[in-house]
Image: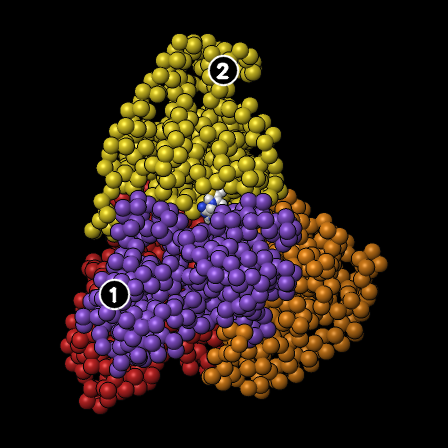
Chain colours: A red, B yellow, C purple, D orange
């Protein structure tokens, strides 16, 4: 086992699947000779050739729409959206088409595409290179939405996503790409879709997070530990379908829940988690279901002083945990 | 039938077209069938049994001529809501269409889930579509890529109206198909109307075919009421595609005889003269006259074929109407591959 | 005062605003001679002329993108999306552009467009003529999202929306168009954006709804009334910005809350309401926060037997109310 | 400066062009300024003071020639991220650009909210843009509609790269503009690259200009390193637009001298010969030679202008760097019209 970054893990996972199954191809802007804006497909063009590593014209509807066509004709395409912020012009193809193919054909046609999108803030990307886009997809039945936080999960989940017969939105937090390192087995292994992971056990408060926020939550949990509060950290990993059981059983144990996400608060992913807890764990709750998220502004402002003021961080999470602990 | 309007067609050059007499009669039967299914759907609509319908009347020659030019069962068909004739000619029998229009449980396209007009049969390479105009066009580019990628010589034909050419999906799809010279035929059924919006408010150019110029492959306009001409042009495009010469945009100029759909009333926005005038371009009558005048068919056979169509449809309708409705709980399932 | 339908109310409101202010124009498919798919602009072409009633090519990105350009150059365009289901190809223009113009220009440019979209199920429209689309917009800061349920509110709110300097997504429930009638004053009046309306008072349970579901909730409330349970029905009217105060004060009074929406359950609008209640009204809750919504399927199936099985209805609402009452 | 490469330009026909000497020197100064601002941004980038930049180097003639052809303060400019030269020439001084690039509170474009390269000044009719490629194109159609609707003769000019022409937004916008013959100029700065994707993988056609055919209005290709030619062509398009003759698509063929942005390294995907070769097409040197050869400018004046540019930038940079950063709480506000 070697220590790898999230980026390396995604790259390795894709490369292995491409070796394994020649139905897998990658299409996106600059994925060829340049190896992708973040270098996720570095070296792929030389290794797999132009037929499988397709530099696309600048047109996201086309990228996803064409990937859909490939998928319904027997291929397993991976469509790369250069930044998650640019996925919205492909929104119609994803929501009206990919998500509904199976249902509308009563099971005759599946649509096994993977749409990869680097998302998230903390990189001074400004309004259009920072966005969280998960709820727009996690609301849509028929889609699978994945958001790993560690290199291990990233590799295991990209492999499961490629093999899945359903359309997967695979969200790679760009701040974690090079920042987060961890042990990743060489060679084949998968992490199942739809399963959350308890990244840290604790008995007093449950924190639910995904992506970069998992790491911030773990940092905050360490701090609270020193203050005598046991914090359990759940990494959802897959946002749709949600692993409700893991969340419910943790909160039934701790009685208190904090949900952390970097998207803006209103109708962010944490809203659904709160709703589930308020209805299905009501009798177990010993305090309000709290959320730490970004404020309701259209997107992250560019200048770091403003950006960092908006983003959740370990301090804000620790503060919320203290409030809950004292409740 | 007294006057022969299409003298020029007196002879049908079967050999030149590469068609047998049986195939030509098959086309004719499918055109009659498409028309008759449409007419029966209107009746079922008026009886309140069919909630919604989009008819293919006026488009039959374009739809059926183009399908016959393809290798059915091998090539890939991506129809849009108006393509009843495409579905039929590609092998989906009228029973399918009635089951679908009635939203029955046995509807082979969608098990009663989709609004009528959404043809889909995986075993016949008819691809499921949405109601969103234009989204299928990039799909056709992707299916063509996949066929070629595997070294197969299947060609994809994807259908749409002239209104759909205004959408970004059209542009993005044709652009990529041109760059990669993919085996795909973009088949536009131009009836001059997008519901109430006439072509002059939809685009400046006279011919949709000319839009191909910007994508570096041929665009052809064809009289979409002439089934054999549609066949010829489409067969050439398919041959080019199969030989690796890339895509073709075909524009079949057709007429929309009925209102846009059962929810529409085109007398609100079209003049009586306009509506009256287009009846002179009935593709079914045109083909009938052509067949009779060229002695490919005689009047007795014609009657036989028509009676056979009627019988088939009587049976299909009865069977479809007797078929059970979906259960309420059929609404769930097939959201994901598992479950 | 005359009795009018929701459709007539919207039409009248638009016509009055067009008379009042020649910056108002309407653009959409079939809005001209045909008067719109639902006849909302019937007679407008003759009355206001081709320059103001613009039949658009079939291209939603263009419709909204061009409306945005008009708006930033001094006009007040109303873009009609023929069915809400077709708004997704304009999603990028709405979310990346309209919603962010003011923020990204630090207030220099506003984007006063209204995007009207007939939404909702119950009309045997199948997968693509039935959808609920509100959360995809109500999650986006910078947008205003309006969803009236009565003719009075429809007229008052369309007028406020047209006059608003912010981009408004105006959702007209197509099942209410001709079904719901009510008194509507002739001439000018407005209903303010951002204010919920208590459509029925009650002391035991609060129901929060919008659109068609308000009427179903009112029906269910009548039933429960006979069973001795007092149900308060809040019609949100504006979904973003949310009138949190009205909801919170009602639930603080009743102690019990049911949220009804016809969108699919997961991450539907009710998720946010639940989350707010679970965090800000926690101490007042005498029972779980319940939701009645459609199941998590990609969209409404066509055949009425399936469609009606999916949609919330007065019976399902009454059942949930009974559960809450018994809690 | 020893050899004169552009003999054909020996004379500058000021009168024919409708330009005064001052205007021509203004163009020259703005081109020098745009280049120099870019160069300084790279330096600030290397010093870690500027996080991100997109340079206009190679595009200066196209950007500045086109702006001078418009009525500044009256016509509407919709730039994209590469249009530093457009912003400058349209009246936004270098101080603005530095404040913006540094994300300062006083950044007049966005108060430090947008990534550098997003020019916007309402008082100068420079319209705020996003980073999403192509979305601004329909905006330009809408602004043009509004101008004409009010009976004003303002023309909109909207800028984009050749990559943007692949997007549906481009197609939908041009289609509508053609139908309504709107007073808008679509100005494509074709540098042959969309980051690492060459034009051959972006489209089949040689000239972006030819894409206008499908929309029924003229498309013109112009040497985008020749500022006066760009000026002439754009002025004609603006005159046509003002006279109600509708849109024009102008393609200025330019070179991208630097990597796509400060995050990119074009040596990864471009050959040294390619990169070396394009330096021969420096629009700034070309114009300088033209001015000197035609005696519109002498070497002393040239030096004076350059010194003035340097002085202006020294001052602007110092002032910008000293300007306060945004407060953390500046992140809120201006989400809605109230509050
Ligand atoms: C994206 C989208 N916008 C609007 C509609 C509503 N609509 C359905 S059919 C139609 C007109 C289509 O015209 P055309 O493409 O010419 O096909 P035709 O019906 O004439 O065969 C419209 C506007 C839709 N289904 N999808
Ligand atoms: C919709 C969208 N997709 C992808 C990107 C990422 N991106 C930024 S610039 C660019 C290339 C643009 O090329 P072109 O339009 O030719 O302009 P140039 O930079 O060459 O001037 C890409 C792919 C984006 N900003 N927006
Ligand atoms: Mg049509
Ligand atoms: Mg370029």
Nearest the viewer among B18 and A35 is: B18
Label 1 CB, ligand 1: below 8 Å?
Answer: no
Q: Which mark is residue D251?
A: none
Q: Is residue C225 left or right of residue A82?
A: left
Res C5 seen here? yes
User: From the viewer's perspective, is residue A70 above or below residue C311?
Assistant: above
User: From the viewer's perspective, is residue C161 above or below residue C203?
Assistant: above
Q: Chain of mark 1?
A: C
1 vs 2, front mark: 1
- Residue at the (27%, 41%) spot, across then down: B111
Q: Which mark is residue B290?
A: 2
SS at mark 1 in the image: helix
Nearest the viewer among D2 and C256 is: C256
SS at mark 2 in the image: helix
Q: Chain of mark 2?
A: B
Q: How many marks?
A: 2
- Residue at the (72%, 60%) spot, across then down: D152
Which quarter of the figure is the C terminus of chain A placed in? bottom left
Q: Which residue is mark 1?
A: C226
User: From the viewer's perspective, is residue A4 above or below residue A201?
Assistant: above
- Residue at the (50%, 82%) spot, across then down: D330
Indicate the position of residue B213 as horizontal and vertical percent values. Answer: 57, 40
Indicate the position of residue C121 as horizontal and vertical percent values. Answer: 36, 52
Indicate the position of residue D281 as horizontal and vertical percent values. Answer: 65, 59
Work out whether disc 1 and disc 2 sit on a shared chain.
no
Quarter residue A150 falls in: bottom left
User: From the viewer's perspective, is residue A146 above or below residue C83?
Assistant: below
Nearest the viewer among C200 and A28 is: C200
Q: Badge 2: how crowded within 10 Å, few (<14), some, or many (20+)? A: many
Indicate the position of residue D273 as horizontal and vertical percent values. Answer: 55, 56
Which quarter of the figure is the N terminus of chain A placed in? bottom left
């Amino acid at each position: 086992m070697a220590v790898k970054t999230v980026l390396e893990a995604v790259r390795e996972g894709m490369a292995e699947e491409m070796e394994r199954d020649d139905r897998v191809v990658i299409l996106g802007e600059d994925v060829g000779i340049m190896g992708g804006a973040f270098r996720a497909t570095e070296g792929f063009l030389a290794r797999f050739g132009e037929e499988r590593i397709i530099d696309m014209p600048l047109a996201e509807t086309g990228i996803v729409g064409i990937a859909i066509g490939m998928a319904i004709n027997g291929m397993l395409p991976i469509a790369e959206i250069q930044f998650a912020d640019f996925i919205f012009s492909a929104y119609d193809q994803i929501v009206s088409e990919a998500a509904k193919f199976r249902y509308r054909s009563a099971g005759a046609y599946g649509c096994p595409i993977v749409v990869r999108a680097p998302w998230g803030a903390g990189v001074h990307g400004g309004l259009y290179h920072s966005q969280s886009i998960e709820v727009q997809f996690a609301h849509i039945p028929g889609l699978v939405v994945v958001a790993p936080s560690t290199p291990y999960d990233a590799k295991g989940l990209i492999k499961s996503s490629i093999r899945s017969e359903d359309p997967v939105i695979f969200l790679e937090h760009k701040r974690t790409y090079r920042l987060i390192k961890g042990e990743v087995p060489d060679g084949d292994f998968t992490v199942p879709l739809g399963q959350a992971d308890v990244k840290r056990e604790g008995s007093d408060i449950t924190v639910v997070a995904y992506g970069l926020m998992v790491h911030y939550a773990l940092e905050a949990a360490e701090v609270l530990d020193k203050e005598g509060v046991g914090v359990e950290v759940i990494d959802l990993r897959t946002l749709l379908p949600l692993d409700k059981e893991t969340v419910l059983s943790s909160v039934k144990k701790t009685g208190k829940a904090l949900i952390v996400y970097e998207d803006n608060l209103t109708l962010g992913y944490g809203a659904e988690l709160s709703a589930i807890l308020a209805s299905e764990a009501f009798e177990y709750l010993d305090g309000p279901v709290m959320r730490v998220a970004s404020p309701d502004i259209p997107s992250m402002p560019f200048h770091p002083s403003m950006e960092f003021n908006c983003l959740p961080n370990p301090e804000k999470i620790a503060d919320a945990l203290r409030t809950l602990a004292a409740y | 039938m007294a006057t022969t309007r299409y003298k020029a067609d007196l002879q049908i050059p079967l050999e030149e077209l590469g068609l047998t007499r049986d195939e030509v009669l098959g086309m004719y039967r499918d055109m009659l069938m498409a028309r008759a299914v449409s007419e029966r759907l209107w009746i079922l609509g008026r009886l309140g049994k069919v909630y919604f319908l989009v008819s293919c009347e006026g488009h039959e020659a374009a739809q059926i001529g183009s399908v016959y030019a393809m290798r059915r069962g091998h090539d890939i068909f991506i129809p849009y809501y108006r393509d009843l004739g495409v579905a039929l000619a590609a092998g989906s029998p009228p029973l399918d269409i009635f089951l679908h229009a009635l939203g029955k449980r046995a509807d082979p396209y969608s098990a009663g889930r989709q609004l009528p007009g959404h043809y889909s049969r995986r075993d016949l390479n008819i691809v499921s579509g949405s109601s969103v105009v234009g989204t299928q066009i990039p799909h056709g580019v992707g299916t063509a890529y996949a066929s070629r990628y595997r070294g197969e010589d299947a060609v994809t034909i994807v259908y749409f109206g002239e209104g759909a050419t205004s959408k970004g999906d059209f542009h993005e799809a044709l652009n990529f198909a041109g760059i990669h010279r993919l085996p795909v035929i973009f088949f536009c059924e131009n009836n001059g109307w997008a519901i109430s919006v006439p072509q002059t408010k939809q685009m400046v150019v006279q011919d949709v075919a000319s839009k191909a110029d910007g994508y570096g492959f041929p665009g052809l306009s064809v009289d979409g009421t002439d089934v054999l001409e549609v066949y010829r042009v489409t067969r050439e495009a398919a041959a080019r595609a199969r030989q690796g010469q890339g895509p073709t945009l075909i524009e079949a100029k057709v007429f929309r005889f009925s209102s846009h759909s059962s929810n529409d009333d085109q007398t609100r926005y079209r003049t009586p003269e306009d509506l009256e005038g287009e009846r002179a371009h009935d593709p079914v009558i045109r083909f009938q006259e052509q067949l009779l005048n060229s002695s490919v068919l005689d009047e007795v056979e014609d009657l036989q074929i028509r009676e056979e169509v009627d019988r088939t449809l009587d049976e299909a309708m009865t069977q479809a109407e007797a078929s059970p409705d979906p259960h309420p709980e059929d609404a769930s399932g097939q959201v994901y591959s598992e479950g």
